Amino acid sequence: MSQQSRTTLTNLALREVGAPRVASYDERSASAEVANDVWDHAVRLALTAHDWPFARRVEELARRNMTPKLSYQYVYQQPSDFLRRGRISDSSSHFDGQPEFACYQLTEHGYETDAETIFLEYIYDRPAEAVWPPFFVDYFVALLAAKITSPLKSARAKQGLEQLADARLASARSQSSSQQPRQRIPMGRWASARRG
């Protein structure tokens, strides 16, 4: 996202607080400095609040050259831009309606397993702001406003903005979920036997 776009998001949050606008997000003003202080934290907090499809990534994990602590054969490194785990599989094709791979253990060194390869679906840090959907922007602006309000406004104003952020999160989750294709539930043994 261009510098102007981050400035625009900062100004939207400052408007929610009732603080003065900034010409640039990195200018030397109280409003800009407070917003910059909490920007990274607010972005990560917003991204981990839900399984946002625009921030989802699938990656084959790199095998580490170390002995696992547990009784597994391999250790796989967690991605450096990891924020929140989605699904994990021992095959990239297993994300299409298959049961989740469960033969692993997460330790401080990474994912320990006997699988030859591991694929991780996860929410990553820093998707470009240009791909943020409008409902996420609404939520993020309210969250950023709640985070910057402490030094700029009263505790009551902060509480109101936190409630606004919670309401916008619920709305954003609903909108995000409604845009996803419905997952087909696998047929159980009873239904399969009945169909012949």
Image (cartoon, rainbow, N blue to C red):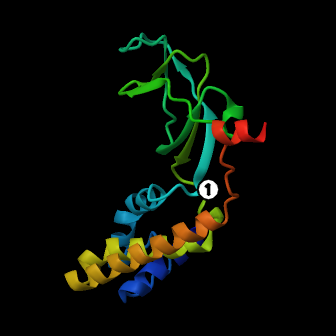
Q: Which residue is drawn at 61% across and 21% down?
A: 117
The amino acid on which the numbered mark 1 sits, given as a three-letter code, is Pro
Q: Quadrant of the N terminus?
A: bottom right
Residue 109, horizontal then vertical, whole percent: 39, 24
Q: In which quarter of the image is the C terminus?
A: top right
Residue 159: quarter of image: bottom left
Q: Which residue lies furthest to the right in this view?
A: 196
Q: In this view, does 99 lie to the left or right of 106?
A: right
Q: Which of 189 and 175 is in front in this view?
A: 189
On screen, residue 176 above or below 165: above
Q: In this view of the protein, can residue 37 be seen by the observer?
A: yes
Q: Say which element carries label 1.
A: helix
Q: Is residue 136 left or right of residue 30?
A: right
Q: Residue furthest left?
A: 155
Q: In this view, does 20 lie to the left or right of 86?
A: left
Q: Which of 48 and 194 is in front in this view?
A: 194
Residue 129: quarter of image: bottom right
Residue 139, horizontal then vertical, whole percent: 48, 72
On screen, residue 2 above or below 58: below
Residue 141, horizontal then vertical, whole percent: 46, 75
Q: Which residue is drawn at 48% across and 10% down?
A: 73
Q: In this view of the protein, can residue 136 be seen by the observer?
A: no
Q: Is residue 157 left or right of residue 125?
A: left
Number of marks drawn: 1
Crowd class of label 1 (few under 14; some 14 to 19; many from 20; radius 10 Å):
some
Q: Residue at x 72, y 40 (%)?
A: 194
**Which residue corresponds to mark 1?**
53
Q: Residue at x 77, y 41 (%)?
A: 195
Q: Which of 171 and 25 is in front in this view?
A: 171
On screen, residue 34 above or below 106: below
Q: Nearer the viewer, residue 110 or 182?
A: 182
